[in-house]
Amino acid sequence: MKKIVTIIGARPQIIKSSAISRAIQSDFKEELNEVIVHTGQHYDENMSKVFFEEMNIPTPNYNLQVGSGSHGSQTAKMIEGLEAIFLSEKPDGVVVYGDTNSTIAGALAAAKIHIPVIHIEAGLRSFNKSMPEELNRISCDHMSTLLFTPTKTGIENLQREGFSLEHSSVATIDSPNVYHCGDIMYDNSLHFAKVANNFQTVMEAEKLSENGFILMTVHRDSNTDIAENMEAIFTSVDELSKKYQIEFVLPLHPRTKSKLKSQLSDSTYDQVIENERIKIIDPVGFMDIITLERNARMLVTDSGGLQKESFFFEKPCVILREQTEWIEIVNNGNAILTGANAGRIMSAFSTLFEQDNFTYPSYYGDGNAAKFICQKIVDEIE
C-alpha cells in the first residue's frame, strides 16, 4: 500500500480534496493510505470545520494552525511544519491542489527532501505574474512528478514551458508525467448537486425563486481594497438591478461587508443599502452555494471556483477580473471578463442576460477525474 500526504489550507482545497478522499474510500482502499494535513492557512477555523462536517470529509490528521500573515511568514511556517511531518510519515507522495501558499509550501518542502509531488490543477495560467497565485502554480508545476491538468489548455501551457507529453512507466521530478484528467471540481459538483437537494433552506430563508435572482460574490483584494473598483462594481450592480428588475444576492464575508462602508462613496453606499433588490446575506456553506448557483439566473463574481461552477451548472457569468485561468468558458461565450470597469460590467451583463443560445461543451471531463488520478498515483509513483 502506498501512503500519500494531502495538503489543504484554504476552503476551496478542502472541497477539492473531498473528491480524492471519496475515490480512495470507494475504489482504492487497499492501495492508497491518505494522511491529511490542514495548514490552517485560512484564518477562520470554524468555517473550515463546517466544511469538513457538512461534506463528510475525513478529519485532518494534522493541523499546523499557521493562521494569517505575510506571504513570507505564512509560507515559512508551513514549510517548517510540513517538512517535520514528511520526515515522520515518510510518504510515497505529496498531493497539493491549485495555487495557494499551502500549495507552494507543500511542494517545496516535499521536493527538497526528494518526495514526489503530485499537483492537481497543474498547467493553469493567468499570464499575470503580479498575482501571487500565478507564481505559486508555475513554481509548483516545475517541482512536480505527476501533473494533472483539468483542461487541454493546461496541457498546451505546460508543453510550451518545456514539459514532455511522453509518459514514463515510473515518473520522477526530472521526467514528470503530465495528464489531462478532467476537473475534480466537476466530480464534486455532480456529487454534491445530488446531496444539495436536501439543503434548500437558503432558498426558503431568503425567499428566492428559481432563475429569479443573480448570485454575486466579491472577495479579491484587487477589488475590495481599491475604492475606485468597489465604486465601479456597486454602482453597476445598483443600476443593473433596477434596469432588469432582478435581485442580486451577495453572500458577503464580514471583511468584505465592512469594505462597503469604507470604500464606497456615501451616496453609493446609501443607494446600495437602500436598494431592495440588492440582498446582502451572511456567508453560506458549500451546499448552500451549490444550491444558489443551480437556481440563479446568472453569476457575477471574482471567484475562480464560481466561474467554473457557473459553467458546470450552465449559467452565464460576468467575471470581475482582467484575466482568468478558465479561458475556455470565455472563448466559448459563456463568460465575459470585465475587471472592475463599470461600462464593461454593464455591457457584459446585458449581453449575457439577454442571450439564450449558450452551449456547454465537456471541457472539464466526465466526472471521473479523481479515480483517474488515484490510479496514476498507484501505477507511477514508486
Image (cartoon, helix red, strand yellow):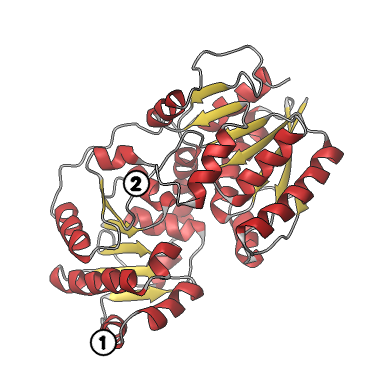
Front residue of 322/194: it is 322
Q: Is residue 255 above or below residue 351?
A: below
**In the image, is 50 to the left or to the right of 226?**
right
**In the image, is 261 to the left or to the right of 370?**
left
How far from the left and from the top, in percent, is residue 312?
A: 36, 43
Front residue of 158/13: it is 158
Residue at 32% across / 52% down in the picture?
Answer: 322
Q: Residues within 10 Å of mark 1 (few under 14, many from 20)?
A: few
How far from the left and from the top, in percent, is residue 376?
A: 61, 22
Residue type at the position of mark 2: Phe
How far from the left and from the top, in percent, is residue 22?
A: 61, 38
Quick one: SS at disc 2?
Answer: loop
Q: Image quadrant for the N terminus?
A: top right
**In the image, is 13 to the left or to the right of 185?**
right
Residue 201 quadrant: bottom left
Residue type at the position of mark 1: Ser
- The numbered dot on residue 313 is 2
Quote the CA–CA distance across marks 2 and 1: 36 Å
Residue 289 quadrant: bottom left
Residue corresponding to mark 1: 267
Q: Is residue 11 above or below residue 29?
A: below
Q: Nearer the viewer, mark 2 or mark 1?
A: 1
Q: Image quadrant for the C terminus?
A: top right
Q: Is residue 13 above or below residue 53?
A: above
Q: Can see residue 231?
A: yes
Residue at 82% across / 34% down in the picture?
Answer: 90
- The answer to which of marks 2 and 1 sits earlier in the sequence is 1
